[in-house]
Amino acid sequence: VPNESAILRQVAKLAAARRCPNLVLGIGDDCAIYTPRAREDMVFTTDMLVENVHFSRATHSAQDAGHKALARGLSDIAAMGAVPRFCLLSLALPPETPARWRNGFFAGLLQLAAEHRVVLAGGDLGTAPVITADIVAAGSVSRGKALRRDGARPGDRIFVSNRLGASALGLVTSKGAAGRRHRRPVPQVALGSFGRNHHASACIDLSDGLSSDLHRLCLVSGVAARITAPPLFPGASLEQALHGGEDYELLFTVPPGRAFRHSALTCIGTIEAGPAGRLFLDGKLLRPQGYDHFRNRK
Amino acid sequence: VPNESAILRQVAKLAAARRCPNLVLGIGDDCAIYTPRAREDMVFTTDMLVENVHFSRATHSAQDAGHKALARGLSDIAAMGAVPRFCLLSLALPPETPARWRNGFFAGLLQLAAEHRVVLAGGDLGTAPVITADIVAAGSVSRGKALRRDGARPGDRIFVSNRLGASALGLVTSKGAAGRRHRRPVPQVALGSFGRNHHASACIDLSDGLSSDLHRLCLVSGVAARITAPPLFPGASLEQALHGGEDYELLFTVPPGRAFRHSALTCIGTIEAGPAGRLFLDGKLLRPQGYDHFRNRK
């Protein structure tokens, strides 16, 4: 049985393969040390992935779980229009978890990290009754340029990336492209940067479902919204596209007159003055119905 | 039953009472935004607190658990000689957890945060089979000045803060001052800054026990160490002081000739050349015996 230090040394070795120039010190001390760049803002998010809540071993491989843990964090960084730089991981496992599972988890996480040049800079290892992974993702963005949720204004157009409903469909079928999107969501980092460079007024990632997340953005921006049906992932229903969570696509609002052309972005409506958070779909009231951990409890 | 958004709004209100001047955006968006100061390094740590692993509801009040979650993170910041600035919290609770418990947890956490002028800048709320809290703490330190574990050199003196064994004693008795120290450990932030200002060569916080943590520091510094018995917390045994975890006191190494006088710091030995990580207590070999989640599994 390897002990905690041995596991950490192994992970540190894997993680050291990638370097972030401003990360002075990574795994192995009480803290990671980062030297900020000139004129840089930093953005931070934390997201917990819990077995049998966010994934199950029956439907997700260890690699899928590792990928998903980091993808959720990177999607939050993307939604700020920022570039991810490094991450930290707290991982608690049941004592009987096979070493193979643990190694697979790190492999899935570190592969996605490598794709985005993100360094695993530290973390914590422990035990828990079910697999519990908390990811901390940190990113950087030019000072004052981060995209926030509260910048939407009446007259702005609403865009979503790609097609919606894949994850909800994949949750049901577990098959094909939708199954893969459910197990390995793709954080839209490049589109987040596109949105920031093209002066989006607000952005949010679709983690709980279009209706909930657009509602949230409108609530903090103090506006209402009017949309038509979003582009559907092949095989997904309108319900799945509107209320299904975990698509991790991005929703932008864009001031009138700003060019915002990209093959992966579709305009689905406009922001308007009105009661904060009120949504209309094809002229009819649309109620937010996304996932809420505490509302959905039995 | 309040939903996730309602809980977050309530927490955001409480957290907003404190401000960190460089935190541009806190709870309520996909990420927190921080504008780094000039000539500042940032340090980051993450620590997971799991019910029935790190605490139990029988021995810890909700306030104790909230305090402990943050104290662990602040202690890591202190060990770098840094000043804590903000924190993020991922909290997953069994669905049947009373609202009173959740409120108590936030009260305990936010009270300690206020004492250290630390802002709760964001997080995640979800469900899990047992209470699971992952704290992310971020601090700042003058560029290049963070205290690391790997700076100890032969000839350096070894200092520890205050007296050791309180937490191990308190774990057994649950009573008096030791019980309080076990339930509400005190992160030694001011002493960490003292160590940095007085040119300590290395520092580590005593989270797993003196023998383990000194062993770790020596291992990465490539040195051995020779110590005498550390100051004992009243009622604690030498065993508890050497191998008991969760004291969250600090251990410094200090180059010869550097003044390092402070009423809370005691010199307990010296670093010497020798096999990396080898420890002697009063001339006899001392084996590290601190807590290891994976080694101690049944």
Image (spheres, coloured by chain):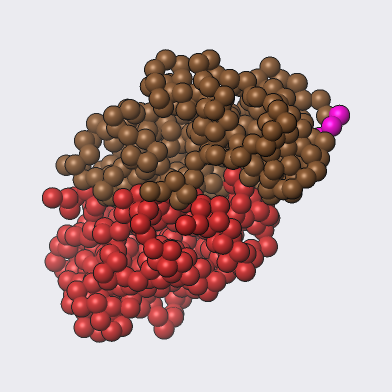
Chain colours: A red, B brown
Residue A247, by quadrant, is bottom left
Look at 73% across and 31% down and name the residue there. Answer: B283
The residue located at (65%, 24%) in the rendering is B229
> Is residue B129 at least partly visible in the picture?
yes
Q: Is residue A115 above or below residue B95?
A: below
Magenta residues? B253-257
**Horizontal and vertical percent position of residue B213:** 60, 39
Left or right of residue A232: residue B117: right
Q: Position of residue B166 (x, y in %)?
A: 50, 23
x and y percentages locating residue B194 in the rendered image: 70, 28
Q: Is residue A180 above or below residue B98?
A: below
Check residue A12 for magenta coloring.
no
Q: Nearer the viewer, residue A34 or A198?
A: A34
Relative horizontal placement of residue B288, taking residue B51 as reference (left or right) = right
Residue B255: x and y, percent?
81, 35
Q: Is residue B121 above or below residue A190?
A: above
Give the residue drawn at x 46%, y 66%: A103
> Residue, x 86% and y 29% (percent of image)?
B257
Q: Can you say which quadrant of the picture contains the N terminus of chain B?
A: top left
Q: Is residue B103 visible?
A: no
Q: Quadrant of residue B158?
A: top right
From this viewpoint, which residue is outermost toward the front? B284
Q: How many marks?
A: 0
* Type of secondary structure dominating the magenta stretch: loop
